[in-house]
Amino acid sequence: MSENPVPVYPQPPSGGAKIPVLFGAVLALIASNVYLFLQFDKTKDDIAKTKEAFTEEISTVRQTSSISVATSKKQLIQLQDQLETARRSAQMSSGQAKVDAEKYAETLAHKLEAEQKKAEAALTTKIGEAANEAKTAIGAVSTEVGAVKTEVGTVKTDVANNKTELDKTIVSLKTVRGDLDGAGMKIATNSGEISALRALGERNITEFKLGKTKDPQRVGDISMLLKKTDIKKNKFTVEVLADDLMTEKKDKSINEPLQFYTSKAKQPYEIVVNKVSKDVIIGYLSTPKVTSAR
């Protein structure tokens, strides 16, 4: 009976484990930024609606005030007519009748003045109340807009900071010559750098943890068979199965790009092993984004 195959596991976090977290945080913060911009647009719509409601309220107050003013004006005109009538009667009267007519005219004059003041005070109060309500509503919306702007600014800063960290890691990636064509290529030496290499978007990255088994294990669209490991020298030997052809990579070192061609792409496939332990190697497979027949 054949041995049970050892499953391929993703590489556990290492010293650079904070970079995947930062990379994930960048994506989360970008999503938050989009959400906050949508909220900001919604708040702008709320402001527009509030302004429209305020305009309608002022219009209503003006209409109500116009009716009140018209009513008060009518009453004032009536009082003025009565006052003029009383004054004419006083001028035409004599004796006690004249005195009574003058007192009546004076009373009407005071009443007229009181009505004028009352109408002016009511109009001023009504307009003041409407203005205060509108100012309060606009102030609340302005505060909300300010809070959204502040939060958007914070998210932008966080995104910029995390992007800077990721950029630094990308810049620090080592360039090593491949074992096939000798061309220089960027490699990652830990999980953090693997995340940065993936973020470049230039190639497909598949991480693996390969144990020593009897049968080849699937990694991406190829198969690999670990033959032996040398922990003291950090060396290993693997066989790579692609296009039904087996290629041996013998006594290779960690962080050394192992290259081979397939019928699927013009650019080579690359294997980089970052860690060697007893009968186990950990690393990643890098394949071209564009696949086409060679």
Image: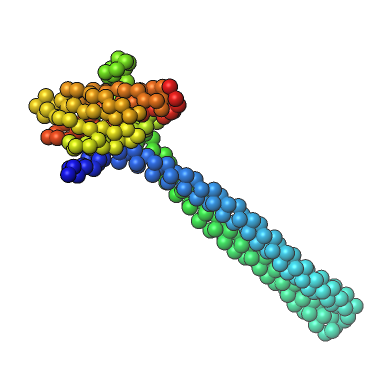
Left or right: where 217 falls relative to 104: left
Work out whether residue 87 or residue 19 is closer to the camera in this orientation and state it.
19
Residue lying at 14% horizontally and 26% vertically, measured from the top left? 234
Residue 180: horizontal and vertical position, in percent?
29, 17
Residue lying at 39% horizontally and 25% vertically, measured from the top left? 263
Residue sticking out furthest to the front:
1
Residue 93: horizontal and vertical position, in percent?
88, 80
Work out whether residue 126 or residue 251 is closer to the camera in this orientation and state it.
251
Work out whether residue 283 or residue 21 is closer to the camera in this orientation and state it.
283
Work out whether residue 110 or residue 50 is closer to the camera in this orientation and state it.
50
Q: Is residue 275 above or below residue 158?
A: above
Left or right: where 222 falls relative to 236: right
Residue 225 falls in image quadrant: top left
Q: Quadrant of the C terminus?
A: top left
Left or right: where 75 falls relative to 139: right
Residue sticking out furthest to the left:
232
Q: Is residue 23 above or below residue 263?
A: below
Residue lying at 87% horizontally and 81% vertically, measured from the top left? 94
Q: Quadrant of the N terminus?
A: top left
Using the rendered image of the protein, determine whether residue 173 is visible from the camera's viewpoint: no
Residue 118: horizontal and vertical position, in percent?
68, 70
Residue 150: horizontal and vertical position, in percent?
43, 45
Q: Is residue 224 above or below residue 102?
A: above
Residue lying at 20% horizontally and 32% vertically, measured from the top left? 226
Using the rendered image of the protein, determine whether residue 239 is visible from the camera's viewpoint: yes
Residue sticking out furthest to the bottom:
96
